[in-house]
Amino acid sequence: MARPLPASNRPPSDRPASDPVVISGVGVRSPLGDSYEAVADALLAGHSAIREIDLGAGMAGLRTLAAALVDSAPPGSVGRLERINLQALTAALADAGVDARGAGPRLGLVLGQGAEHLKEWEADHRAAGANVFTGSGPEPLVERLASAAGIAGPAVAVGAACASSGFAIALARSWLETGLVDVCIAGGCEVISPTAMAAFHNLRALSRWGGEAAAASRPFDRRRDGFVMGEGGAFLVLEAASRARRRGARIRASLVGVGMTSDAAHMVTPCSDPRQAARAITAALADAAVPPDAVDYVNAHAAGTPVGDVAEAGAIALALGPAAATVPVSSTKGLSGHLVSGAAAFEAVACLVALERQAVPATANLDEPDERCPLDHVRGSARARAVDVVASNSFGFGGANLCLVLRRAS
Amino acid sequence: MQVHRSDIPVALCGQAMIAVRRHAIDALRHAPAPAGTADLPARFLRHADEQTVVGIHAVLAAVAEAGLPSTALATCAVLAAPRLAGRPAAARTLSGWAAQGHATVSPHIVPQCSLHAMASAISVALGCHGPHLGVGGGPEAVAEALEVLPWLVRQGGGCRVLMVATGWDDEPALAANGGSAADPVCRAVAVVAEPAAAAGLRCTRVAAPPARPRRGAEELTRFASLAAAVVAGSPVGRALPSWSFVARRGALLRVDVVAADRREAA
């Protein structure tokens, strides 16, 4: 018979609090911009990237609303997924001043991944290839990215649906804490494909908004009716604070807390019971040794789905207790759309923006907050305030719950 | 040349390998769970990928071997490492689209055929509220999973992890409807891992000549051999052999078992 396990809800940290894991580089490829500064400006100004996009004749009869990337190749084309990921990844390394080819095996890569195999089979199929039928094809995406970027250390892909790139960041932190690597780059980028768009449409998960495209994504609003797909994402370079300081790197923030749980409720439908999501937030705050009332901003996962947003509001209320009434909350998906597997990393960047600019981005299109989501919503325009600690929620199909806590660089 | 090394403080308290020919997988979708484990929700595996069906039964068998009561599953984490999962459904979907348009695309294709899907299915079916995630997805999935396992074991101050790796012994050629003229074997190896006071597995990434991916059968059988040896334990003073898994970019992941009498030195 298996023995009982310890009941502690807090992961052991191998790194002293005085030497936390920090974020020393950011690379972004997003519909709101392809640089940290551009994304920061767009988020705080409230510029929406959601438009009607053309996914080809095969989508006849569907209104294809999305926040698409500006790119040289259309969605669904061969090589687009790899190129976009590589652009964000190499931008992050450059921002951190890390020479991957000179870093040797102590530089690792963790890629957050969703339905990438499906997307690559689809692109190949549309180009008259047969990889989906033969099982042949290129090396896995994470291997191609590592090879192209010159990363010699461990490289893995992890999948937790819409929370994937956040789990990648959490794993990277653990690799640093346990000494497996000295520097780790983590994140991921999503691309839109016709099949994914059709599947989400047929699932009735997408917004069927009939009005202005930019108003379709409406987190926490009474008239929300589903999410709007976006594409892109981000990569973060992580390393120990002491190492970053030694080499004179710019420290953007410390990653001080991680909490992860599962709803264990349903493969597709968001869980209406907020307890497990709340437990992830609570665990992340405990890991960070941050009391609820010290949180200055919660970047909500809120994608604009009828059930998911209410459940998340409940989770925030449960985890923060009385502080939930005064901690500012917003979802950036009203502007960027839902970047799916790239969402968590992109929203970590939104948190960096809040820490750096000392301002909380607003939830777009939040005209009438749902009374079942009684939070301190930031809406209308960005809110200037002191921001030292932020929490970022990410949830995924199948009930994956993740919360990351970031602290402003001292 | 040793590139890096990590010691995984785990003990394995249960393991199982299941190999099922493709024609028999549909029956397994409705098969009862082993005695003593939780029943799967009715029709739960109806839309699941074949690897998920076989993988979940391997996990149930490993849980049964470990003697875990169903109440112990609530705190477990889940780590699932499929290999090109979802290909039959993708073949059907892409062929169907070409013939009949977007309305034929199944709403289940993304939630059931993405990298997370098998881990989610296990988490939902067994009621596991610890973190769950998919890893790998390609030919190096076992090596990738072994580099993720220590992280999950450390969660919550020590977390039991249900880990499973799956794949086809040989990737089948598929027809437009996702079917195959061959009757390939789908294999799954599951272990129940739990925290140990000292390293139980030592993973060393070593430089090696570039290697082609191994067949699914070879990599999974190797993992099953490792799991069985660890669960059985080694006689004091006698070293177990090493196992190696392809990790690409000129590397192999060599796994040594750090036996009880060697843990102090580790």
Image: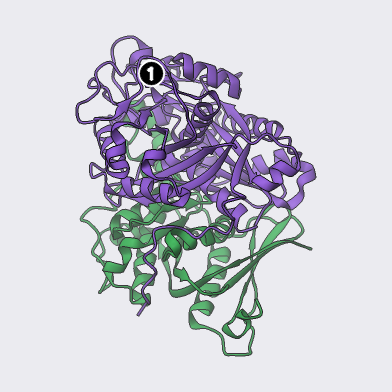
Q: Nearer the viewer, residue A207 or B186?
A: A207
Q: On screen, B84 above or below A314? A: below
Q: Which quadrant holds residue B8? A: bottom right
Indicate the chain coloured purple by its letter: A
Report the residue at 31% width, 68% height from top. Answer: B72
Direction top: furthest residue: A212
Task: Give coordinates of residue A68: x percent, y percent.
Answer: 49, 20
Residue A50 to residue A145: above or below: above
Q: Which chain is green?
A: B
Seen from this angle, which residue lies furthest bottom? B236
Circle 1 packing at 10 Å, graded few (<14), some (14-19), many (20+), is many
Instruction: State which quadrant residue B255 falls in.
Output: bottom right
Closest to the observer: A408 or A232?
Answer: A408
Give residue A98's position: percent from left, percent from top.
73, 38
Secondary structure state at the residue bearing disc 1: loop
Query: Is A59 placed above or below A315 here?
Result: above
Q: Is residue A356 left or right of residue A263?
A: right
Residue A283, percent from left and from top: 39, 51
The residue identified by callout 1 is A64
Q: List x then y, in percent, for residue B61.
A: 36, 71
Of B163 and A126, the residue lying toward us: B163
Tell me which chain the residue with mark 1 is part of: A
Q: Quadrant for the N terminus of chain B, please.
A: bottom right
Left or right relative to A215: residue A193: right
Which amino acid type corresponds to the residue marked 1 in the rendered image?
A: Thr
Residue B5 in sight in this render? yes
